[in-house]
Image (cartoon, rainbow, N blue to C red):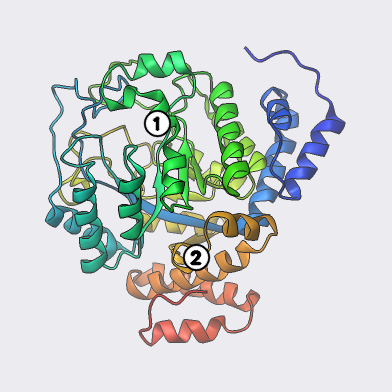
Amino acid sequence: MVPDIKIDLHRLRDILSKSLELETLSMRDVTTLINIDDPEVWEEIFETARRVKERVYGRRIVLFAPLYLSNRCVNNCIYCGFRSGNVGAKRKVLSIEEAVEEASFLSSRGYKRLLLVTGEHPSVSGVDYLEGVIDAIYRRTDIRILHLNAPPMSVDDFRRLKARGVGVYQCFQETYHLPTYRYMHPSGPKADYEWRLSVMDRAIEAGFEDIGMGVLLGLYDWRWDVCALIAHSRSLIKKYGFGPHTISVPRLQPAQGSMLDAPPHPVSDEDLKRIVAIYRLALPYVGIVVSTREPAWLRDELIMLGASQISAGSRTSPLGYVNGDDTEQFEVGDRRSLEEVIDRIVSMGLIPSLCTACYREGRSGERFRELSEKGLIKRFCHENALLTLKEYTEDYADGDRKGYLSRFLVEEARKARNGLFERFREIEEGRRDIHI
């Protein structure tokens, strides 16, 4: 139950002004936002979140796809279709050849960044296997950056993966509420709350400056978990000079073989919109990621009010792109293809981005945060988004889609800094991976 707290509009507008100046909010500011329940006031908050996102990133929306390496897992998380106790699951571990096949399939559709996802099992979460997959995909496909969602590991193992060129290391705490965490994770290595809580410190110690965090919304009261995640992020910023590069907002969804019939603490669509806005205002520089768990119409709304990265055309089972889905980790709510998502983003006046430049140019960690908080990162984001969309248009679009994307690019280039048309010509002549 939300406390019946009288809204101090002067204080609220002070908080919104701080966000518009791209300042990280205090925990008192965050709790003030969380305890607001007036729909009219929330419209003002949503509008501020839209403005903050545009000040940081401009109009670009980053696109990527997850690549599931395995659904084998020794953990028994009661909400997950991959849990060890799901005897009806059809288990699959990709060989290196199969991983390359999946990555090649995605590359042939225009993707340039992938998120590798694996359960916790000695055969797939070990660093030797992951190194082999990462090396092979980089060597044999056109994928430019691989991110990794994998179980917590040691500093030495993180160092090995960072040396292989992994961009973001992503791991979700699921819930910060200890009694709920213990109930939801009854057995397996994931039952160790402290080991998971400290994973980002080990990743940063090993050299990862881009880390991805999140909670699984619906396991516990979202207000608690959102506050806790922001507090965790602030502690990392204080300690290292940077916190999460991305925060994801997954809601608990039905999964084949789950032990939960419904979320213990349901998060409504309106709640999810508020959560995205709170993250955007509290941590202005952070990328907010919305997966295909959510329906298309809601994802469209979320990218207008604060989200900056979305997956597209996702499959959540191993070999799901090549062979179709089998045992999925969760039900997919948005089944639009990459092409359809690009069409929709353009129709909304935004710019689809397949950019990978920051990870490869060293704009990460504290440097990325500083550029973002000065409103400078969007200069890179805007032009790189257009350059990657031009590549996509030349290599993967055809017919009417190629025509309208080409017209869109010309209109955008006319508004951009000098030199973009020249870069477009270079792409038309066959040069690739042009970025600033």
**Real-space CA distance between mark 1 and mark 2, rounded to the nearest whole angstrom:** 27 Å
User: In percent of the image, x 43 and y 55: which residue is there?
Assistant: 63
Instruction: Please identify the quadrant where the N terminus is shown.
Output: top right
* Amino acid bearing label 1: Arg
Q: Earlier in the sequence, mark 1 or mark 2?
A: 1
**Left or right: where 353 falls relative to 15:** left
Residue 209 versus residue 433 in the image, above or below? above
Residue 397 seen anywhere in this rendered image of the structure: yes
Q: Secondary structure at mark 2?
A: loop
What is the x, y in percent for residue 194?
42, 26
Quadrant location of residue 227? top right
The residue pinned by badge 2 equals 362
x and y, in percent, of residue 180 in the image: 43, 15
The residue lying at 26 percent from left, 23 percent from top is: 188
| Any part of residue 262 in sight | no
- Find residue 383 and report its horizontal and vertical position in percent: 55, 71
Residue 176 percent coordinates (x, y): 49, 24
> What's the residue type where badge 2 is placed?
Gly
Seen from the viewer's position, the closer of residues 93 and 289 is: 93
Q: Which label is found at residue 196?
A: 1
